[in-house]
Amino acid sequence: MSCHGRATNSILTYQGYNPSYQWSRPPPTVVGWSTPDDLQNTFVSPTAYASPDIVCHLGATPAGAAAPVNAGDTIEIQWTPWPASHKGPVIDYLANCNGPCQNVDKTKLKFFKIDEVGLVDAASGTFGASQLTNNNNSWVVRIPTDIAPGNYVLRHEIIALHAAGQTNGAQNYPFCFSLAISGSGTANPAGIPATQFYAANNPGIKFDLFSKFTSYQIPGPPLYSGALSVAQSKAGPIKATASGVAGLANKNVVLRPTSPAAKVVAAAPSPATTVAAKYAAAQTLVKKASKRTDAPRGA
């Protein structure tokens, strides 16, 4: 493992999926759901909202492992560079697999929304995706503290609106990761299948990004009442100086496991660490142990 800085929050990186893995023999076991059909970093169109592709992207199949997290932990999702022009909401969902996620039928997963950021500032045209771009192409989301322990699927999504002024112009980029969540909660939030999230004519799906707008309606089901807010901020890259690494005391530790056993765990509840994810190829998942006590979001 390579460590940088001082241990304020620990971050452990788990590998997500890259379409190139389908040509590896054997392919690596990762926590990101496989999307072998997404060779061009493409999107899911509103014409496919009723199809299984909207669940976790094109032809997605369950991950072979799960990342261990605790209820209340913060998860950082790392993308490859996201275009600044692709503005839109960032939305996160969870679904309980009610058993091992490796064998789950994705069409039967019932997701509840745990995070959403739409229009942040109308004057500057800042959306959730803009924050992601400005935050080193990363996003953070907190796992609710009250949910029951078990095996869950985290569904993370950006909806790009740059062509959404026309019907079926919105571009959905959903990616999924398997989590083994530990905790003492008992809540089992009701959810709905991803195929029921959106319709092509929803106000937040058919939306003219280039009009003079002052509001934006985030699409999908309502936010879970136990959802937790988290600031979208990330320290900049560590800079080396002649005398060493600058600002060590203010940096988080980043742990990057080198052995396959350290990168993945069996899909069962276990003690937490941290996780990160990537754009379109969705390659990494990062978890941060959070000590914050933010108030619940939603009604």
Image (cartoon, helix red, strand yellow):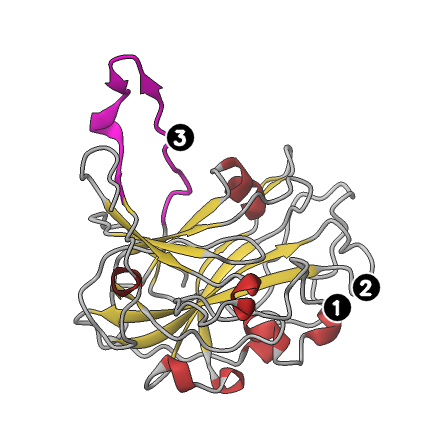
The kind of residue tagged 1 is Asn
- The residue that disc 1 covers is 201
Horizontal relation, residue 225 to residue 70: left or right:
right
- The residue that disc 2 covers is 167
Q: Tell me where the magenta segment starts and ends, as one range.
A: 230-254
Residue 119 in view of the camera: no
From what the image shows, is residue 183 above or below residue 87?
below
**Image position, residue 236 (x, y; %):** 40, 30
Quadrant hosting residue 219: bottom right
- Along the polypeptide, which appears first: circle 3 or circle 2? 2
- The residue that disc 3 covers is 236
The structure residue drawn at horizontal position 43% and vertical position 55%, both measured from the top left corner, is 284
Residue 21 in view of the camera: yes
The kind of residue tagged 2 is Thr
Horizontal relation, residue 183 to residue 176: left or right:
left
Q: CA distance from mark 1 to mark 3?
A: 39 Å
Specify the quadrant that holds the C terminus.
bottom left
Quadrant hosting residue 220: bottom right
Q: Is most of the magenta stretch helix, strand or loop?
A: loop
Residue that sits furthest to the front in the current view: 25
The structure residue drawn at horizontal position 24% and vertical position 13%, both measured from the top left corner, is 243
Q: Are marks 2 and 1 in contact (CB under 8 Å)?
A: yes
Mark 3: give few (<14), some (14-19) or many (20+) Cα within 10 Å.
few
**Image position, residue 253 (x, y; %):** 24, 40
- Along the polypeptide, which appears first: circle 1 or circle 3? 1
Horizontal relation, residue 189 to residue 207: left or right:
left
Residue 86 within the magenta-colored segment of the rendering:
no
